[in-house]
Amino acid sequence: MIVRLFSLIAGSLAALALLGMALLTLFDVVGRNLLRQPVPGATELTEIGLVAVTFLLYPLIAYRQSHISVDLFDDFMSPAVRRILGVIGNLLGGAVFAVFAWQLWKQADRLMGYGDVTSYLRLPLGPFVYFMAIASGATVIGFAVAAIATALGRDTTDDTGQIKSPGYE
């Protein structure tokens, strides 16, 4: 239930951020070409939107195991070997995102300490980097749950790619 709720909220927020970026780009182009007045700070807002979309979706991608993978040798391996490699892959992915979370948190602390802001809109950078660190931590959890599910021979998604409930009914 919590996983489905998180998936719904994160997916919806990512979709809204993507819609916002599309509308912002539309208004910026129309304003620049027809009115000779672009949207102030459009580039910075687009960058922030891209961060939001990307980092909101990382945990879902990790949990659903819908990241890019190459299965060149799957036909030559037994299911047990594929399962072991799946667990190892999820653990490695989790480890990489754990390092990301740690380093992003340290960077956010530095940015907050320095008072760094965006160049045009003067938005503080620290909160955005904290968000990236927290989302990276959530991605670690997604990889960990996927690793456990893979080790137990369960899949975290159904045939349509939708998230299964944690009980795997």
Image (cartoon, rainbow, N blue to C red):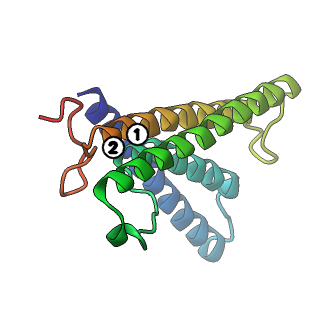
Q: Quadrant of the N terminus?
A: top left
Q: Is residue 1 above or below residue 58?
A: above
Residue 24 position in % (x across, y down): 54, 58
Q: Nearer the viewer, residue 14 or 34?
A: 14
Residue 67 position in % (x across, y down): 44, 57
Residue 2 seen in the current view: yes
Q: Secondary structure at mark 2?
A: helix
Name the residue that disc number 1 marks: 147
Residue 150: give its label.
2
Which residue is rendered at x = 57% and y = 37% of the image? Answer: 136
Dividing the picture into quadrants, the one containing residue 19 is bottom left
Residue 60: give its label.
none
Q: Nearer the viewer, residue 40 or 91?
A: 91
Residue 40 seen in the current view: no
Q: Are marks 2 and 1 in contact (CB under 8 Å)?
A: yes
Which residue is rendered at x = 36% and y = 71% of the image? Answer: 76
Which residue is rendered at x = 59% and y = 71% of the image? Answer: 29
Residue 66 position in % (x across, y down): 38, 56
Is 165 situated left or right of 24 in this image? left
Q: Nearer the viewer, residue 92 or 12?
A: 92
Which residue is rendered at x = 60% and y = 75% of the image? Answer: 34
Q: Nearer the viewer, residue 29 or 37?
A: 29
Q: Quadrant of the C terminus?
A: top left
